[in-house]
Amino acid sequence: DAKTTQPTSMDCAEGRAANLPCNHSTISGNEYVYWYRQIHSQGPQYIIHGLKNNETNEMASLIITEDRKSSTLILPHATLRDTAVYYCIVRVGGSARQLTFGSGTQLTVLP
Amino acid sequence: EPEVTQTPSHQVTQMGQEVILHCVPISNHLYFYWYRQILGQKVEFLVSFYNNEISEKSEIFDDQFSVERPDGSNFTLKIRSTKLEDSAMYFCANSPPGVTNEQFFGPGTRLTVL
């Protein structure tokens, strides 16, 4: 699975968009980009995933660059409850494959 | 929305004792996983399970660990002889059939080995 690089921490004002970047310059053609988050002491929570195209769901949007070497998770209107560690994980889809969690980005939403 | 449930939420045991952690996955999911997170550290993969057998396991998942689906719904992790370093949060996860295989996690069981 390709390695990812994320900033250690970020702050965002409540109500503003939170843009969380992830670099995955060694991603291969069959690898997906997954985003999870972990609110303190809780289980990781699936947010969104994508292969090449931008994706949007009720939680967030995922923007993947055309060369697929980086992506950005966007929380359009951050709330205090979005304070969490956000993990960008690149992995081949299919089968019962493990997720490899890095250190992620600690997002703090400020009132 | 269906959720993964785990019991107990907190388990305290003495070193050398056996523990069994329980998970009830989302009903139509076919792939099952256990992860653990030692306090202050990263989430680590232990094992994945599909079609009643182990698909992948990490170096952590040694002979003291085992998994099973005893009744076709529950998914259990057994630690035969607990050590102090097994103290951690243990998360069950599962994923539906399909290519993208996104995983849905339970709330975890906090295991404390004394």
Image: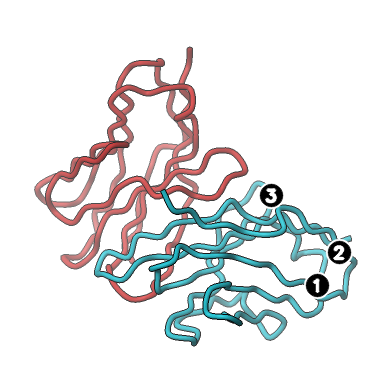
Chain colours: A red, B cyan
Vertical placement of residue A34 versus B50, above or below: above
Amino acid type, mark 3:
Leu
Answer few, some or many: residues within 10 Å of disc 3's Cα (few below 14, many 20 plus, some between 14 and 19).
few
Vertical placement of residue A103 versus A1, above or below: above
Front: mark 2 or 3:
2
Amino acid type, mark 2:
Thr
In the shown orientation, is residue B73 left or right of residue B78? left
> Closer to the N terminus: mark 2 or mark 1?
2
In the shown orientation, is residue A70 left or right of residue B92? left
Gap in angstroms between the C-alphas marked 3 and 1:
17 Å
Gap in angstroms between the C-alphas marked 2 and 3:
17 Å
Q: Quadrant of residue B50?
A: bottom left
Q: Are marks 2 and 1 in contact (CB under 8 Å)?
A: yes
Element carrying mark 1: loop
Q: Chain of mark 1?
A: B
Q: Quadrant of residue B12?
A: bottom right
Answer few, some or many: residues within 10 Å of disc 1's Cα (few below 14, many 20 plus, some between 14 and 19).
many
The one of B53 and B86 positioned closer to us in this rendering: B53
**In which quadrant will I find the N terminus of chain A?**
bottom left
Label drawn at residue B13: 2
Identify the residue at image location x=18%, y=56%. Answer: A51
Q: Give the percent coordinates (x, y) of residue B22.
A: 65, 67
Q: On the image, numbered disc 3 is attached to which residue?
A: B39
Front: mark 2 or 1:
2
Gap in angstroms between the C-alphas marked 2 and 1:
8 Å
Element carrying mark 2: strand
Q: On the image, numbered disc 1 is attached to which residue?
A: B82
